[in-house]
Amino acid sequence: MVGRLIYLIGPSGSGKDSLLDAARETLAQRNCRVVRRVITRSAEAVGEAAQAVTVEQFEQMRERGAFALSWQANGLHYGIPIEIDQWLLEGHDVLINGSRAHLQKSQMRYPTLLAVLLTVNQDVLRQRLLARNRETLAQIEERLARNSRFTGDLLANNPQVFPLDNSGDLQQTVATLIGLMERRDACA
């Protein structure tokens, strides 16, 4: 039996990294591998535990066919290692931190993927973004407005995207994610 790609997406500050860290052990017990992305930013940058590479290294990796999926966003390059294809063939589910803008291309390559949109109440998201202290208030407000438009359009135009609210208790979000994966397994 071939595994399925679980494609986690959501705005910056929605808690994708926290969710992945909290769910990692439970996912491993379910035969699901969590992928470490390749990103063109310094290893000292705060954020997910990704493999940091230079733009030149990234381009060389892409030219060698090292990525199953790759995209650019916010001035950075992101890559998902090609090993996921082998893991899927071996029957593992594979969970990646994807890109909302790259979802359609990913669905074309992996037609059975489960797209999970991590959502957060706007007030909670605002507080999380303020606490990170990376952007001005004006930048945060623009990010919130853009997220609201993007999320609404994504859910309205893609019925294969399942929203997952992460405004409250993280363990509840983990339980809901696992439940969604189990329900989708029954339908697959």
Image (tube, helix red, strand yellow):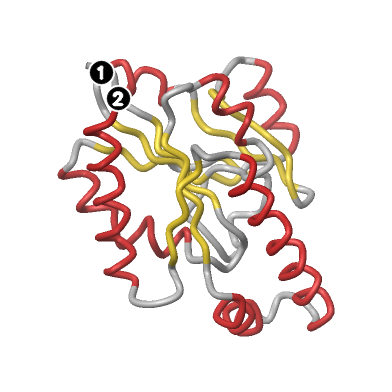
The answer to which image quadrant residue 40 occupies is top right
- Foreground pick, 18 / 38: 18
Residue 33 placed where, x, y %? 31, 38
User: What residue sits right under mark 2 in the picture?
Assistant: 3
Q: What's under tag 1, amino acid-wise?
A: Glu
Where is the N terminus found, in terms of image quarters? top left
Up the image or down, 61 lies above or below 136; here it is above
Residue 15 placed where, x, y %? 48, 65
Q: Is residue 187 left or right of residue 69?
A: left
Up the image or down, 1 lies above or below 184; here it is above
Could you classify mark 1 by the number of other residues whose Cα lies within 10 Å: few (under 14), some (14-19), or many (20 or more)?
A: few
User: Tag 2 or tag 1, which sits nearer the N-term?
Assistant: 2
Which residue is depicted at the point 81% across and 70% down? 142
The answer to which image quadrant residue 151 occupies is bottom right
Q: Is residue 42 left or right of residue 174?
A: right
Which residue is depicted at the point 47% across and 59% down? 16
- Foreground pick, 65 / 8: 8
Could you classify mark 2 by the number of other residues whose Cα lies within 10 Å: few (under 14), some (14-19), or many (20 or more)?
A: many
Where is the C terminus found, in terms of image quarters? top left
Residue 156 placed where, x, y %? 62, 47
Q: What's under tag 2, amino acid-wise?
A: Gly
Q: Secondary structure at mark 2?
A: loop
The answer to which image quadrant residue 137 occupies is bottom right
Q: How many marks?
A: 2
**Which residue sits furthest left?**
29
In the rendered structure, find residue 90 and report the number of the disc placed on it: 1
